[in-house]
Image: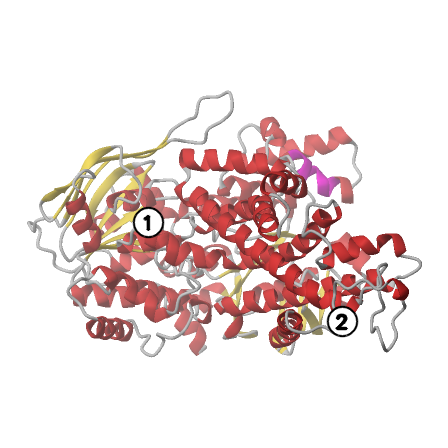
Amino acid sequence: MRVRANAVIGGTLIGLLVAVSATATFWTPYDPLRINLRARLRPPTDLFWLGTDEFGRDVVSRLMAGAATSALVALLTVAAAVILGVVIGVLAGFVRGWLDRVLMAVNDTLLAFPGILLALGLMAVIGPNKWGIILALGLAYSPSVVRVVRATVLSVREREYIEASRVIGNSEVYTMARHVLPNCVAPIVVLATSMFGWVVLAESALSFLGLGVPPPAPTWGNMLSAARPYLDQAPWLSIAPGLCIALTLLGINLLGDALRDKLDPRMGAA
Amino acid sequence: MTQAPLLSVTDLSVTAGDRAVVDRVSFSLQPGEIMALVGESGSGKTMAARSVLDLLPPGVRRSGGRIVFDGQDLSAMTPAQMRAMRGPGIGMVFQEPMVSLNPALSIGAQLAEGLELHRRLPRDEVLRLCRQMLARVQINDPDRCLAAFPHEFSGGMRQRIMLAAVMLLQPKLLLADEPTTALDTLTQREVLDLMVELTRDNGTAVILITHNLGLVGRYAANAVVMEQGKVVEAGPSRDILLRPQQPYTQTLVGALPRRGPARPVPADAKPIVSVRDLEVVFPGRKRMFRPSHPVHAVKGVSLDVRPGEVLAVVGGSGSGKTTLGRAILGLVPARAGHIQFAGTDIAASDRAAMRRFRLACQLVFQDPYSSLDPRMRVGPIVAEPLRHAEDMDRRAREARVAEVLEEVGLAGFADRHPHALSGGQRQRVAIARALVRRPAFVVADEPVSALDMTIQQQVLTLLQRLQEQHGFACLFISHDLAAVAQIADRVAVMEQGLVVETGTRDAIFDNPQHAYTRALLEASPRIEDLAA
């Protein structure tokens, strides 16, 4: 029962996000980029539902336009980090030996840098655009995925059903794909959902440093950082994107929980 | 019976949620008495004993009844009073010695903990008592042991240390929850003998929670048999074992493995698997700054398995019997030796021969909880070995899976996941998976030792029936001599990586030659001994 509530609430939140991102490309209440200096820092009214920012741009329109960029960047970044992390982690954990040692040495070196610092360095090379962010953050966050996947693979590969698969005559690659990988899904889903949150924040930090999605294009991250000087005059400027990020995270987490339970046969049939 | 009982439990009920796990159970215990609490898993025996100590898991609570210990009503005690009672009043030894000692603390620190908490003795007095107690439980070098950590000891040693820690406080009652289930026969005997001696000297009463009827006969004066939370039968152990009154108790006693008549085995049959001078060496743990010590697990074993026979390999833990089974199947690399299958040499270099051999052999694992992939359904699990049967189409495979599931008594279970099955059912799935490709040779590694008594008997009988029907040769690895007596045609006894004695079942059981074989037979508890 609880599982279904998770799925419904999470699905609604994420569905809303997707719908808003999709419509924003065709229609927003105002042009999200139009500057209106006569309407600076307006509090929420029936004209501007969530007020206006320091350049008089409509916050609702900017949030809608930003949803597309922020959600897309976060989603693709997480996907990149997970795919990279799973491939490397499974290789290290299943093949073991010198390959494991080399991969883990490189991985631990990357892990020793703060993710954001690593991303900064990569961004300086790749240049500030959407694809650069995805690539840089994906690389920066994959080492933690590698760690988790390798640890899970190491524990799963010692179970007897892995040996049973060898006794049957299955090849190592088949055993890995059929028996090891599916049993690693739960920790990966948990990690991926929490990573979504870090990525939204990291993207905003990069924007704040001028390396994110370049202004004036809105993202939730750069809206949040731009709102900081006006925290006491115009708190809605911070609250609105913050709330959007929080609700998205909530939705992703609930959906992730539901997905993990759905993928675990022990949860369903009982 | 003039003495007041040390412990009397009246109408004890324990519930987990809405379900009664213990239902109006009553028993009593005299000072110094050893009582056995017998039952299968889920019978509520552990919960009944744990509620005496008020150590129930979260979500489980005592819902009724009175527990009077030494004249005090335990059910009315505050948590603080209860804590003072644990240790000096009532001690407990747990089942799993590998996890019941804290791996981060030295043995000395763990032994001293109880004394410091309850007796407030000076430091050197505590040390003296600890040393004395360790010597008492036959630990060779007590001083070294005090400074050592749990991982440096074997399961049997740990259980002795556990016993020492509990008995240091000289409790009036000891709860022993399956204290030797995780140990092999010889160690089990040593630990229990020690427990009985220590508690007798100290006048401690014991509640021995067990599923092993042999142990009940040997150690306990009285026994209480539980089934599904209720007491089924109670009384002197002799009467319960030799003249059980209730149907359930009769089933339990009837489930003990019995030796049947020997099957005729053609003595000059050519062996299907023959092993010569097999040696397995594990590299040993690598230590910084110290050379690793390789472990010689199998030191030159030769044996023959003939078509259609069951050859049992028996021995204590660490005797190398499991490693031998895996090495024969090529799952662990052998350092030296030859394996012949149906007359041809299986060398690791000849991949085609190796593969043919692999496909003709199967393994049944000990633990049915970890040998099945939790994400797969029963049907695909059983069907998986048929991936390598190139001559079968999909229909033929499905038919074969259905046939095998029918044979192991699991028709209609193909859509279930392993977690929805009981231990016995899972082991049947494992057996079905092993037999689906009609193997010529099956290695069964302790296939029943993780199961309940009555289930053990069912699985053992099933294995025996299938073996007779299909005539595959079987290497039956076990430390349980009773099970071996039921199923084996011949027996090989292993000690420290060597086969010390081989012979027909009856020769080994009736006329053991080697000292180790005699010790094993002697340590294995049988209820027939009671009648004598």
Q: Residues within 10 Å of mark 1 (few under 14, many from 20)?
A: some
Residue B187 pos. (x, y %)? 45, 44
| Amino acid residing under circle 1 | Glu
Q: Is residue B230 left or right of residue A207?
A: left
Answer with mark 1 or mark 2, whichever residue precedes in sequence: 2
| Relative height, residue A192 to residue A240 (above, below) | above
Q: Which residue is mark 1?
A: A172
Q: Residues within 10 Å of mark 2 (few under 14, many from 20)?
A: some
Q: Which residues are magenta?
A: B108-115
| Relative height, residue B420 to residue B101 (above, below) | below
Local secondary structure at mark 2: loop
Count of numbered circles in the view:
2
Let me know if marks 1 and 2 both belong to one chain: yes
User: Which SS does the magenta portion mostly show?
Assistant: helix
**Chain for disc number 2:** A
Instruction: Determine whether label 1 and label 2 are within 8 Å by CB.
Output: no
Q: In this rendered view, identify the residue nearer to me: B132 or B451.
A: B451
> From this viewpoint, is residue B449 visible?
no
Q: Quadrant of the N terminus of chain B?
A: bottom right
Residue B112 figure quarter: top right
